[in-house]
Amino acid sequence: MSSNNARTAIVTGASKGLGAGIAKALAGTGAAVVVNYRVDAEGAERVVADITAKGGRAIAVQADVAGGDDVRRLFDRAREVYGPVDVLVNNASVVTFAPLSDITEEEFQREMTTNVLGTILTTQALAAQDDIDAGSIINISTAGTVSHPPYASLYVASKSAVNAFTVITAKELGPRGIRVNAIMPGPSDTEGTRAIGYVGSEQEAQTIAATPLGRTGTPDDYGPLVTFLASDDTRWITGDVILASGGMR
């Protein structure tokens, strides 16, 4: 696989979980990585320390992707330190599992603003750079847009919008050499899924039983796929939404 040593990558929501794993994987291929976080500064700095200890390049930058001013500041800081941003991984998201009757207007706004508007704002910021002639955007969706699990209607609706956004923006940005793809991770063992009690639960056991590869995913499962999509090896791939769930669907 081609290296990414000439790349500058922003990974949103990278202080832990899938984002942290993706940031480390990109740094391992030589990319300079901006580890974005909203509130977990300690976690973000820990990811940066892990990367730099292995000879990689990384900085942590606080920004809420749901705000345009924050997004502009994020990109300005990345460009100040490493130059034009040509890889963007839209990983930051909010997820709430609740029955239909419990969905509130406030939760709708919170989830849609981060998951959908955040993806739009960061994509706009990358595309607004007039000094790049190529780029790769990888949006992190969910296998739930295929499996449609109960009690995830709001989250899956937001990620379904991200899938559609991926395909359409690939058509718009393709003439500029900017590729846009998405991956749909399956249930994974992360700090978040442990916090909500999923890991070790009966629900996890049922999901594993329905997964051909017979286990729960880990952050390490997604980094190689993202680095592949960020590299020139996938120069002819854009507008794809790729299921990465161990066969669970």
Image (spheres, helix red, strand yellow):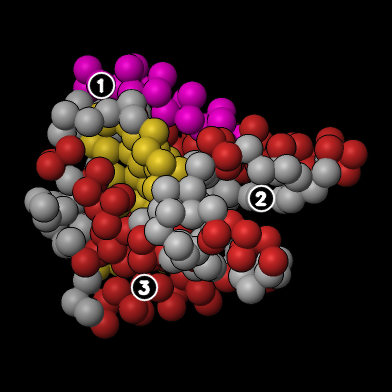
Please state if 186 lies on the left or on the right of 181 as rendered.
right
| Residue denoted by label 2 | 95
> Neighbour class for label 3 at 10 Å: few (<14), some, many (≥20)?
many
Kindly indicate whether the residue at mark 1 contacts the one at mark 2 (C-beta within 8 angstroms): no
State the image coordinates of residue 31 (x, y, percent, origin top left). Answer: 21, 58
Q: For residue 174, which numbered disc appears in the image?
A: 1
Of badges 3 and 2, the one in the foreground is 2
| Label 3 to label 1: alpha-carbon separation | 32 Å
Please state if 51 lies on the left or on the right of 67 as rendered.
left
Of labels 2 and 1, earlier in sequence is 2
| Range drawn in magenta | 158-176
Q: Under tag 2, what secondary structure?
A: loop
Residue 207 on the magenta span: no
Please state if 150 lies on the left or on the right of 193 as rendered.
right
> Is residue 112 positioned above or below 96 on the image?
above
Q: Residue at x 47, y 65 (%)?
A: 215
| Label 2 to label 1: alpha-carbon separation | 30 Å
| Residue denoted by label 3 | 48
Q: Which amino acid lies under the numbered mark 1 shown in the image of this protein?
A: Gly
> Quadrant location of residue 36?
bottom left
Residue 102 in view (yes/no): yes
| Label 3 to label 2: alpha-carbon separation | 25 Å
> Neighbour class for label 2 at 10 Å: few (<14), some, many (≥20)?
some
Q: Which amino acid lies under the numbered mark 3 shown in the image of this protein?
A: Val
Q: Residue at x 18, y 61 (%)?
A: 29
Q: Under tag 3, what secondary structure?
A: helix
Q: Which amino acid lies under the numbered mark 2 shown in the image of this protein?
A: Val
Kindly indicate whether the residue at mark 1 contacts the one at mark 3 (C-beta within 8 angstroms): no
